[in-house]
């Protein structure tokens, strides 16, 4: 059993096995040494669906789909949305969550930090 560390609302890191996991269903998303988004389902949304035009005409205050795309990332196990990205068309998906696993494991092994209920805490706080 790997220690689980909450990374986001619905994203968990299994530290020893170095795997991204869905925080809702526990689905294995992929290697934590890789971009978490590679293991997620991707849906592209029309910006006007999210930001409805406020007025009629050329300038509606809704993003122009020729300039922006909205990508939503979902767990393949349960369908929970894990992240959203606004990107120009043609721009590659970004790598937004990167953990220095080697440093994290070294600090855990040295007793500098501990994981309590999925949260990383300084060891001296837990001892107090």
Image (tube, rainbow, N blue to C red):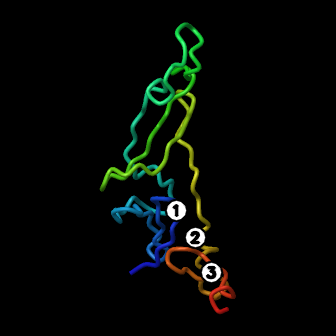
Residue sitting at 47 percent across and 37 percent down? Answer: 71
The answer to whether residue 29 is above or below residue 60 is below
For label 1, the crowd category at 10 Å Cα-Cα, with few meaning under 14, some 14 to 19 and many 20 or more, is few
Toward which corner of the image does residue 30 lie, by quadrant?
A: bottom left
Tell me the residue that label 3 is attached to: 106
Image coordinates for residue 72, horizontal then vertical, percent: 44, 41
Image coordinates for residue 98, horizontal then vertical, percent: 59, 59
Image coordinates for residue 100, horizontal then vertical, percent: 62, 67
Q: How far apart are the two marked residues, 3 and 1, measured between alpha carbons?
A: 16 Å
Residue sitting at 40 percent across and 52 percent down? Answer: 39
Q: Is residue 86 left or right of residue 44?
A: right
Secondary structure state at the residue bearing disc 1 = loop
The answer to whether residue 5 is above or below residue 123 is above
Q: Is residue 46 left or right of residue 112?
A: left
Single out the residue that lies furthest toward the top: 57
Q: How far apart are the two marked residues, 2 and 1, measured between alpha carbons?
A: 8 Å
Tell me the residue that label 2 is attached to: 101
Tell me the residue that label 1 is attached to: 33
Q: Identify the image quadrant of the C terminus.
A: bottom right
Q: How far apart are the two marked residues, 3 and 2, measured between alpha carbons?
A: 8 Å
For label 2, the crowd category at 10 Å Cα-Cα, with few meaning under 14, some 14 to 19 and many 20 or more, is some
Secondary structure state at the residue bearing disc 3 = helix
């Amino acid at each position: 059993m790997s220690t689980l560390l909450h990374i986001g609302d619905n994203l968990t890191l299994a530290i020893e096995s170095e795997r991204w996991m869905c925080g809702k269903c526990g689905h294995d998303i992929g290697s934590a040494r890789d971009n978490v988004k590679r293991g997620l389902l991707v849906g592209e949304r029309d910006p006007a669906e999210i930001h409805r035009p406020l007025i009629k005409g050329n300038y509606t205050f809704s993003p122009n789909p020729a300039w922006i795309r909205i990508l939503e990332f979902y767990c393949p196990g349960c369908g929970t949305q894990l992240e959203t990205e606004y990107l120009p068309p043609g721009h590659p998906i970004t790598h937004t969550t990167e953990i220095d696993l080697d440093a994290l494991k070294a600090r855990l092994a040295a007793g500098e930090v501990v994981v309590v209920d999925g949260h990383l805490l300084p060891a001296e706080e837990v001892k107090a």
